[in-house]
Amino acid sequence: MRIGTWNMEGRRGSAQTAFLEAQDCDVWLLTEVNNRWSLPGYHMSAGSAAMGTDKRWAVIASRLTMDELPSPHEASSAARVAGVTFVASILPWRSCGSSDPWRGEDHATRMANTLYELTPFLRAQSNLVWGGDWNHALAGREYAGSAAGRRDLMTLIGELGLRVPTADLPHRLPSLLSIDHVALRGPWSQAHRVIATDNGVRLSDHDLYVVDTTDRDDGVR
């Protein structure tokens, strides 16, 4: 199975659609998705709560039929595909503030509260793929999140038994590592970044990340 994640920055159009189609993913964990956009040939979840007037925080798109699940957090979306639970999330960034869906006076508290709300649902899934725009690098310099937020996130990843093949991939900005991730329990054959441009024009302020899985016994196939 090929799994991709991309923060679409609320943009829609033929260039964004063609860019996604070219990656040939089976399941997409999409964030900042325009309400008026769809991906031909894919089932799409209704998504999480609204992020402003024109977009949703997170949406899952799958070539296979999926069962949409209740969102475990306002900025997350969940669905079950071929026996695997997929969760797409946006996690708090440093300057996100304390308005809904973020709760807490500082970033570390907002991050801790968000993970606290997500944890029961994530722990209950026997087969889990979790990803999206986590707004944290998992190594190196922390630019978008916080050191405390990273520690809490890494602790939860370990408790869930997940591995994150996107952790060492580069960010769009030089000398930084990705804040967009795909985490899973089974092995993978490769993970790579795809620069989100079309004829030199940015399609989003985030690049796209793809993970290919290899294990045929873990339900991710």
Image (spheres, rainbow, N blue to C red):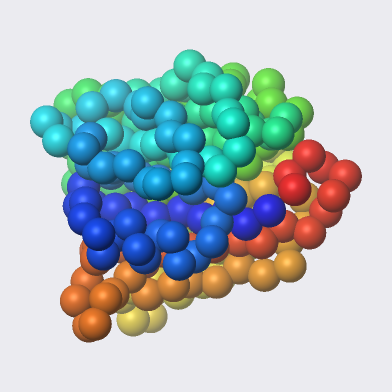
Q: Residue at x 68, y 21 (%)?
A: 124
Looking at the rendering, which quadrant does residue 202 occupy? bottom left
Asked if residue 84 lies left or right of residue 54, the reply is: right
57 lies above or below 137: above
Taking the view exactly as shown, the residue that stands out farthest to the front is 41
59 lies above or below 193: above
Q: Residue at x 41, y 60 (%)?
A: 20
Pick the front one: 64 or 164: 64
Q: Residue at x 37, y 26 (%)?
A: 46
Residue 134 visible, this angle: no
x%, y% of residue 180? Answer: 43, 56
x%, y% of residue 86? Answer: 58, 36
Q: Residue at x 22, y 83 (%)?
A: 200
x%, y% of residue 151? Answer: 52, 47
Pick the front one: 150 or 199: 199
Pick the front one: 184 or 55: 55
x%, y% of residue 126? Answer: 75, 28
Count the numbered circles shown: 0
Asked if residue 183 lies left or right of residue 127, the reply is: left
Taking the view exactly as shown, the residue that stands out farthest to the top is 70
Taking the view exactly as shown, the residue that stands out farthest to the right is 217
Asked if residue 158 lies left or right of residue 106, the reply is: right
Taking the view exactly as shown, the residue that stands out farthest to the left is 53
Residue 126 visible, this angle: yes
